[in-house]
Amino acid sequence: MSITSAIVLFAVLWFLCFLIIIPLRLQTQGDVNKIVPGTHAGAPEHHGLKKKAWITTGIAAVLWCIIAGIIFSGLITVRDIDMFNRMGPAPVTDGTGG
C-alpha cells in the first residue's frame, strides 16, 4: 500500500465514522424548546462537533491500523475477494526468484 492509498483509506474511514457519530447525543432546538424564529425545530442547539471530531479520529485510527495490518500482512488479498474469478489463477512461483 502506497502512502497515498494509506491517506485515502484513513480519509474514507474518518468520514464514514464521522457521519455515523454526528447524530449521536445531538440536542435540537425542539428538544430544548428554544426554537429560533425562522429555523426548523430539528436544527441543532448543542452539537459538540469538536469532541465528535476527536472521537472520530480515534476510532478511524484504530480501524485504519486493523485494516492496514490486514493489507500489509497479506492475510486477505484482492484474489480472495474475486467472486467471479475474473483475475484467473494465481501465478505459480517456484521459489527461485526468476
Image (cartoon, rainbow, N blue to C red):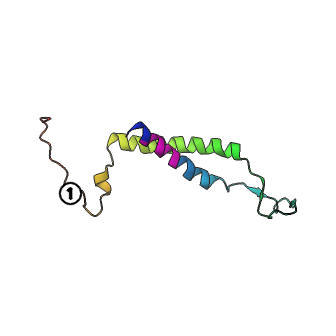
Q: Which residue is mark 1?
A: 88
Question: Is 20 one of the magenta-colored residues?
Answer: no
In the rendered image, the quadrant that contains the C terminus is top left
The residue sitting at 63% across, 52% down in the picture is: 21
Q: Is residue 90 left or right of residue 10?
A: left
Considering only vertical position in the picture, is 62 above or below 20?
Answer: above
Q: Position of residue 45 (x, y in %)?
A: 80, 54
Question: Is 6 one of the magenta-colored residues?
Answer: yes
Considering only vertical position in the picture, is 31 above or below 11?
Answer: below
Q: Position of residue 96 (x, y in %)?
A: 11, 35
The residue sitting at 48% across, 40% down in the picture is: 7
- Report the residue that reaches farthest toward the front: 38
Considering only vertical position in the picture, is 8 above or below 79?
Answer: above
Look at the image and give the residue range highlighted in magenta: 5-12
Q: Is residue 64 left or right of residue 1?
A: right
Q: Tell me the amino acid under the disc marked 1.
A: Gly
How many numbered markers are drawn? 1
Which one is in front, 89 or 7? 7
Q: Position of residue 73 (x, y in %)?
A: 34, 40
Q: Main secondary structure of the magenta part?
A: helix
The residue sitting at 88% across, 62% down in the picture is: 37
The residue sitting at 17% across, 48% down in the picture is: 91
Q: Is residue 98 left or right of residue 65?
A: left
In the rendered image, the quadrant that contains the N terminus is top left
Which one is in front, 43 or 22? 43
Q: Position of residue 86 (x, y in %)?
A: 25, 60
